[in-house]
Structure formats: C-alpha cells, structure tokens
Image: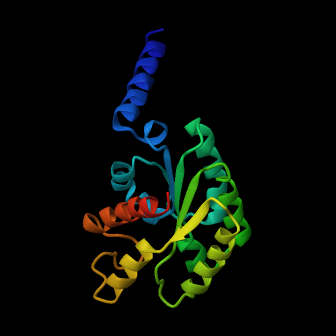
Amino acid sequence: MRVFAGVVVVAAVGVSALAVARIGPFADPVTLVVGDSVTNLSRIEIEETTGAKVVAQNRQTWALMAPRVRGAMTMMGTTPDRVGVLLGYNDVLLDAQDLGATEAVLDEFSDVECVVVLTLPKLFNRDVAAYNAQVQAIVDGLPNTMTDDGWANVINDNLAVGADLVEADLVHPKKGRAKQMLADSYRDAFDRHC
C-alpha cells in the first residue's frame, strides 16, 4: 500500500511540475515539437522557449517517427494548437526519402490548427533543395501546414562563414548558442505562421 501511495504522490508531483512549467498539455497554446537528433539535442531549450512537449529521438526518419507521433498525440490527451516538425536529416543522409511516410506523419496533424515544418539546411553534397521542394509539394496540399526556412537560413549562413554553430559532422547544433538558436527558430516559425 505504501508503494502505491508513493507512486501516486510521485505522479501527482510530476504532473504538477508540468503544469507549473506550462509544458506539453499545460502550455498555452498547447504545442508539440517533433524531430530527430537535431531537435532532441535541443530539447531543453525548445521546451523552455516554446512550452512545447518535444517528441524527438536520435536516428529517426519520417517513417520511424510515424508511430511515435501517434503515441504522443494520444498521450497528450488533447489536440495541440500548434505543431513544429524538423525531420528529414536522416532521410536525406541515408538516401531513404519516403514521401508517403512524410504525408502519413503530417496527416496525423490534420486536426491541428497550425503545423510548421522547418526546412533542411545544406547537407554535404546531398540535394537538399530537391528534398525540401518535395516536402513543400506535400505541405502545399494541406490547409493547416506551412514550411519555414528560418533554421535552414541560420545554418546555411553559418556554414558560409566557418560553421561554428554545428559539430564537426556539420549537422548537429553545438551546445549553448546553437541549441538556443534552434529553439528560437521554432518560436519564430510559430510567431510567423501561427
């Protein structure tokens, strides 16, 4: 009985902490951010800057994130007011673009008022422009979804002057300023489109 009471107290404290911090379903507006390792590494900054519940994991593609997105939407217990998405790095780097999976993930947000997909910055010798155009074509068919190139512009501009915002892999944001810049990019995208 004591163990059960302890679990209930811990759960109540956890829910209360989310409510006080205004994160996830307690944020106003209710915000969900979905991404891969680039977003995952900036999770704390994104939560603090946008109040979002962040669902992000390393090495994820659009196809791998589809079931996680469904689970996150169910666990939130409410439809978010806005969703930010930054996926595609692994799709492009692994030459594993699955536009059907991209559509499937975005379809999960059909009841969301505002969905913003952040476009990808340059990635080595990959044709990111073509990939971004393919995602844009999908987004153009969705009345509640827009793309935003704020993050891509930040990184592309930085790559041109020495790449001090990204790790040696030229993909992942460095600690500190770069992670905050990703969080700011999500916030600014929401401000522009939502």
Nearer to the camera, 168 or 180: 180
Q: Vertical placement of 111 versus 163: above or below?
A: above
Nearer to the camera, 60 or 44: 44
Image-based side of 169 in relation to 76, left or right: left
Residue 28 in the image: x percent, y percent? 43, 41
Residue located 60% across and 66% down the image: 61
Residue 190 visible in the current orientation: yes
Residue 141 in the image: x percent, y percent? 71, 68
Residue 169 visible in the current orientation: no
Outermost residue toward the right in this view: 100
Image-based side of 116 in relation to 167, left or right: right
Residue 146 in the image: x percent, y percent? 57, 66
Colouring of the image: rainbow
Residue 162 in the image: x percent, y percent? 28, 87
Outermost residue toward the top in this view: 1
Residue located 66% across and 61% down the image: 143
Q: Vertical placement of 167 versus 40: above or below?
A: below
Q: Quarter-wise, where is residue 27 in the image?
A: top left
Q: Vertical placement of 148 versus 2: above or below?
A: below
Q: Vertical placement of 154 versus 3: above or below?
A: below
Q: How many marks?
A: 0
Residue located 40% across and 35% down the image: 18
Residue located 28% across and 88% down the image: 161
Nearer to the camera, 159 or 27: 27
Image-based side of 53 in relation to 13, left or right: right
